């Protein structure tokens, strides 16, 4: 077995189709000075044709995965209009008298090499975008056909060094069993789109393959744990086929719980909501019975484009989501960029530690023009549903008050313009910094709700970068310090009488469920795919027993002790369920 990185869950078993790397044959001769004008015209014609193709792919993809994911191609269009990229190509043609295709290839190599040298995963992904757009342009300049995927209906596992969004856009999810990539990451565009399409994906296999994979070879992959097997034997195929069937049966069984009320056997009702970044994800969440949206990550509306989205553009998306929720709550988080999230068109400063620097609410309060534009769009959308606004990375009362001032300014402007909105819109904050947890009682006086962002709270409480492989083992959500910070936050919210929810990975982790029940948390917001699993466990877990366990956990001195007690509690629930089922059979 080969160990890669799981980027989109699911098991795939089948024959491979290996996507070849295209090698361009470029002309070596120089062009005559009298041919410069015609060479530039060839370049511009290739650009026009490439733009038409990209727009067509964007339209086709929008029907499959929604507006947010299809907007990936806005970044590709922006590259073809980028003055720096175009100036590089034009300069090579004009100064070195090289053919347009040669100039394009040299410009691609220049920028890809420059971005690959940066120790930044986001910039490496942008290098792939440039390569994809450049190769499309080269294809038109050279008049060569595009590499095509199999046209028959026989499903296959796609194997490639890397996969661009435009290549992925042409995939028929019914024909693609899974994808194995040598490069890539869980945050790449390919990974985002694979998850949206429901295609199992394993990335980061570079240097781990023991032999060359050829088209027609058998393969199995598990996009959940990141394992891949090239030429598996019959026994292994039978084993994974059973696991695959079990996963399918589990999904079908769990879907029967979609409209079942999320309530414990002793009557505690829990709101199980979804974290989303697009309308497509909302549709999936609603199909799984989501109570609402506990976290709308608006930063994805700002990514993969060449400028900030306008108020009108944001209003259309926010109001569309609010209307589809039909009265169910929609919590919209304001722009959360910085750290590991960048925008191509917004230059962030180079920082030694960007996670502790200029990001999230700090950017919004510094760039109040951008902040107010977003708040105006959110306020206008509040006239179309149960919309709430939430501010990220809050560390002080001053930040909350400053944000509320800008919100009030936006309200006054809309009133003056006669535009309708909910004057009483609720506003809340994310508790994801130790500072916020320590003053949660003070912050609770300022807002209508808390949402505990466990990912950053764990990271900052323990001073552990979870993306750093050398220390990622120290990233421990069930550390005693983390649980104390969470308890402090929930108790402050309860004392003030405000709503308190949890988002982040811990919300969808069934091991943590008794902690949320024991603390009497109001809402858990998670990825849509986790909702039904959490609901199934909730239906079998008593709040009173969870309260007893939670008190025991807060007396534990180590993560190991906490894990042991959680495992014991989980095993007891399973035994109780089995006993109840046995009695029912009799």
Image: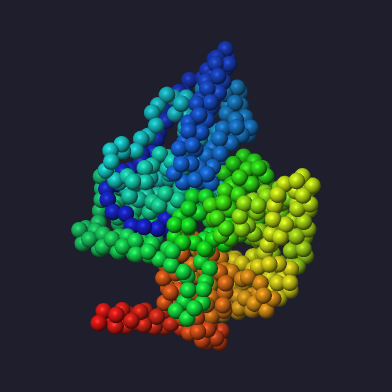
User: Where, by quadrant of the figure, is residue 445 drawn?
Assistant: bottom right
Give the residue displayed 46% in from the left and 64% down from the top: 531
Residue 56 locus on image (x, y percent): 48, 33
Q: Nearer the viewer, residue 131 or 403?
A: 403
Side of 319 relative to 373 (left or right): left
Residue 358 locus on image (x, y percent): 69, 56
Side of 225 relative to 300 (left or right): left
* Scheme of image coloration: rainbow
Q: Nearer the viewer, residue 234 or 310?
A: 310
User: Where, by quadrant of the figure, is residue 492 drawn?
Assistant: bottom right
Give the residue displayed 44% in from the left and 64% down from the top: 259
- Asked if 383 appears above or below 550 in the picture, the reply is above
Residue 88 locus on image (x, y percent): 60, 31
Name, please, the residue furthest toward the top. Answer: 34
- Asked if 126 appears above or below 341 in the picture, the reply is above
Image quadrant occupied by the N terminus: bottom left
Residue 403 locus on image (x, y percent): 74, 59
Report whether residue 89 is seen. yes
Report whether residue 562 is seen. no
Give the residue displayed 52% in from the left and 22% down from the top: 45
Q: Nearer the viewer, residue 534 or 109?
A: 534
Give the residue displayed 51% in from the left and 73% down from the top: 269
Image quadrant occupied by the C terminus: bottom left
Q: Nearer the viewer, residue 429 or 242?
A: 429
């Amino acid at each position: 077995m080969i160990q890669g990185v799981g980027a989109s869950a699911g098991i795939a078993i089948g024959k491979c189709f290996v996507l070849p790397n295209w090698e361009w044959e470029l002309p070596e001769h120089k062009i005559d000075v009298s041919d410069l004008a015609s060479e530039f015209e060839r370049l511009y014609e290739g650009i026009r044709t490439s733009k038409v193709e990209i727009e067509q792919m964007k339209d086709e993809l929008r029907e499959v995965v929604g507006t947010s994911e299809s907007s990936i191609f806005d970044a590709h269009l922006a590259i073809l209009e980028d003055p720096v990229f175009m100036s590089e190509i034009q300069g090579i043609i004009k100064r070195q008298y090289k053919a347009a295709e040669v100039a394009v290839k040299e410009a691609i190599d220049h920028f890809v090499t420059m971005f690959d040298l940066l120790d930044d995963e986001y910039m490496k992904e942008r290098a792939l975008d440039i390569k994809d757009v450049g190769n499309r342009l080269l294809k038109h300049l050279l008049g060569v056909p595009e590499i095509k995927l199999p046209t028959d209906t026989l499903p296959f596992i796609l194997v490639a060094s890397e996969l661009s969004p435009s290549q992925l856009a042409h995939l028929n999810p019914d024909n693609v069993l899974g994808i194995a990539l040598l490069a890539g990451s869980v945050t790449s565009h390919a990974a985002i789109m694979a998850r949206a399409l429901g295609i199992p994906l394993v990335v980061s296999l570079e240097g781990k393959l023991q032999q060359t994979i050829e088209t027609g070879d058998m393969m199995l992959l598990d996009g959940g744990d990141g394992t891949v097997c090239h030429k598996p034997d019959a026994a292994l195929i039978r084993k994974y086929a059973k696991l695959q069937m079990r996963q399918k049966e589990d999904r079908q069984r769990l879907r029967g719980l979609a409209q079942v009320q999320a309530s414990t056997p002793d009557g505690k009702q829990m709101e199980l909501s979804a974290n989303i970044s697009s309308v497509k994800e909302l549709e999936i969440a609603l199909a799984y019975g989501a109570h609402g949206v506990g976290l709308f990550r608006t930063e994805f509306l700002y990514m993969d484009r060449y400028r900030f989205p306008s108020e009108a553009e944001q209003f259309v998306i926010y109001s569309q989501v609010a209307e589809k929720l039909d009265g169910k709550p929609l919590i919209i988080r304001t722009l959360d960029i910085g750290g590991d999230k960048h925008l191509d068109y917004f230059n962030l400063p180079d920082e030694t530690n960007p996670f502790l620097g200029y990001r999230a609410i700090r950017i919004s309060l510094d760039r109040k023009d951008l902040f107010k534009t977003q708040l105006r769009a959110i306020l206008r959308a509040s006239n179309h549903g149960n919309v709430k606004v939430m501010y990220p990375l809050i560390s002080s009362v001053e930040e909350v008050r400053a944000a509320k001032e800008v919100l009030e300014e936006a309200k006054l402007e809309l009133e003056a313009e006669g535009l309708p909105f909910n004057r009483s819109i609720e506003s809340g904050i994310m508790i994801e910094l130790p500072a916020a947890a320590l003053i949660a009682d003070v912050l609770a006086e300022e807002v209508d709700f808390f949402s505990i962002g466990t990912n950053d709270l764990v990271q900052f409480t323990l001073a552990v970068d979870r993306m750093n492989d050398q220390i990622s083992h120290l990233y421990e959500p069930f550390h005693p310090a983390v649980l104390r910070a969470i308890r402090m936050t929930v108790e402050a919210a309860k004392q003030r009488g405000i709503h308190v929810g949890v988002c982040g990975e811990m919300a969808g982790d069934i091991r943590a469920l008794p902690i949320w029940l024991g603390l009497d948390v109001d809402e858990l917001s998670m990825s849509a795919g986790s909702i039904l699993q959490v609901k199934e466990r909730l239906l079998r877990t008593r709040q009173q027993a969870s309260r007893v366990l939670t008190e025991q956990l807060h007396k534990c001195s180590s993560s190991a002790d906490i894990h042991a007690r959680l495992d014991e509690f989980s095993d007891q629930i399973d035994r109780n369920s089995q006993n109840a089922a046995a009695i029912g059979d009799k």
